[in-house]
Amino acid sequence: MSKKQKRMLARIAAAALLFAAALPLPLTGLARLAVFLLPYAVVGWDVLWRAVRNIAHGQVFDENFLMALATIGALATGEYPEAVFVMLFYQVGELFQSYAVDQSRKSITALMDIRPDYANMEVDGQLQQVDPEDVAVGDTIVIKPGERIPLDGVVLEGTTTVDTAALTGESLPREAGPGDDVISGCVNLSGLLRVQVTRPFEESTVSKILDLVENASGRKAKAEHFITKFARYYTPIVVLAAVALAVLPPLFTSIQWVDSIQRALNFLVVSCPCALVISVPLSFFGGIGGASRDGILVKGGNYLEVLAKAEIVVFDKTGTLTQGVFNVTTIHPDDCSEGQLLELAALAESWSDHPISRSLKEAYGKELDPARVSEAEELSGRGVRAVVDGRTICAGNDKLMEDIGVSWHPCHRVGTTVHVAADGVYLGHIVISDQVKPDAKEAIAALKSQGVRKTVMLTGDAREVGEDVAGRLGLDEVHTQLLPAGKVEQVEALLKQVSPKGALAFVGDGINDAPVLSRADVGIAMGGLGSDAAIEAADIVLMDDKPSKIAHAISIARRTLAIVRQNIVFALAVKLLVLVLSAAGWASMWAAVFADVGVSVIAILNAMRCLRQPKQI
Amino acid sequence: MKKRFKLLNLDCANCAAKMEDAIKKLDGVHDATVSFMTQKLTLDADDARFEEILQQAVKACKKVEPDCTIVL
């Protein structure tokens, strides 16, 4: 509790005691007023003062004014205990509100607290703790076990495991050794690291994420705009209605002035829209905070709103549903062993830096002796030719085989096929393909079970490859051989199929698909860890590479919106009910105070649930 | 130019909305948000007159909620 809150608590306690002492006193008239005025003043003087001051500033219809008017009205009509109690209850509610909001603010900011406090820099052989902002690119920093990595960099010395949970929500630590990049915001778990800094603090991953999260509350959801607008009209309307309620009935019916004024005062107490004004942004803030704990960064409440109604989800293939890494998946030798075929292909391709060559070398795994290879030559769009151990080896596609007049046969496996021939004799082929992410199939199934109407995959890749992946994952539609512009056209066509209440989400890896990310109703980028492009272009960033997080993000969004809706409906229903009851003269001022402060407190507690997220699927 | 300022003693969500409204209406302000949750003011205004606009924003806030101060 802050100092201010503690002081308030003391005042409330003192006033409550005075009030309890005053209740049984057998006094009448002015003496009775005096003993009740004492606790009233103790607990409510600031409300009165603020009411007067705000009116002087031209702010008439605020809470303070309404509470002052209502309680002074009660005092004037002789309801002394009511006046004191209402003020007391109001202050208790306010205190609780401010405490609850503080608490949730704290727990949310704690979730996002990945800001490093210091960096250990080597100065003249001595370690010094410096502000991460003072470290320049190229400086060497030391990160001890248990410390947070303060800046992005590359490991010079040491091996360790790194906990990325604060950024990705992924509990499995990653390994890091010399030459590996490490990302700020992660925690170094086991070993001592010497790291060369590659980016200044302002451009580091941690700064980017913090910036994004802090900006998120600035992008307001429609529901938030609705509430502020609503509040602007609601209060004056209720106040006018209260005036009418006070004046009209005594003029035209037999109702007494005292009664009608009391009803009007109750009306005023209910008129504060606080429950809504606080709980709606709090819910969105909580939803965004909870999502960030699971490695899902949402750039604003408005995107949660759109995501909740996603009915078409469009995926990019490479790097999103597949790993974007090419691996040897099949080796079909015709006339030698698998090992021999791979060895020859790897040797022939050993001089090339093509991704296919790299995956062949990786699959071979052993050291390649460059002395065995000579006359290596890259044939663009075909493959390579080289002399290995005295034999001329050709490795490449079907066109290369046609060129050298070797009879080859196609493979039934889908992927990029590398045929190998030695001195004009066909030896067999190797199939290289991109692998589907382990959770991609589940991810699509989870989206389906959440009621996503259509899942679509767009890819620049060949038709067979695209259709094979789409078929295995159970996607509804696939469009292949698309150029970046073609992807935008496809998305635009799909946008026309979206129902008025639905939305289209596009999921990409942030590379080459920035135009599509911004064209979709909500753009989701994967693998935001370390990728600036993704963080810039997307509305929602998944920090790790898991497509299954999309369904999780949708459930977070839906839950947040459900809570927002509950609060709006609940608060309005109770207020309306109490308004009607007090107009009819059936509600006491106690009910009115409950409808104001009590409802706020309940709505805040409900909004806090947004922080606790549904179980991950 | 866009700058962010911390707000102290911003106790009421309704006031935050009112402040935001008042600041947005100031001449030269492109955009402004007052976040009750993060207790921050984001002000996007003309570069040349930023200081002057900021002073006006401070005044506007004082008018809505005298307890609240902008940390400059």
Image (spheres, helix red, strand yellow):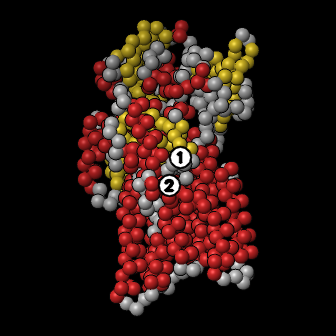
Chain identity of mark 2: A
- Residue A249 at x, y percent in the picture: 38, 85
Q: Which residue is mark 1?
A: B68
The disc at residue A146 is none
Q: In the rendering, at what x and y percent does residue A566 appear?
A: 48, 67
> Which residue occupies the foreground of this view, A314 or A99?
A99
Q: Compared to A160, does A307 lie above or below?
A: below
Residue drawn at x 46%, y 45% as measured from the top left? B61
Question: Mark 1: few, some, or many residues within 10 Å (few <14, many ≥20)?
Answer: some
Q: Is residue A74 above or below residue A585?
A: above
Q: Amino acid at mark 1?
A: Cys
- Give the SS element for disc 1: loop
Q: Which residue is mark 2?
A: A53
Tag count: 2
Chain identifier of the residue bearing label 1 in the image: B
Residue A441 in view, yes or no: no
Quarter-of-image position of residue A175: top right
- Mark 2: give few (<14), some (14-19) or many (20+) Cα within 10 Å: some
Q: Is residue A122 left or right of residue A291?
A: right
Viewer-closest of A18 and A28:
A28
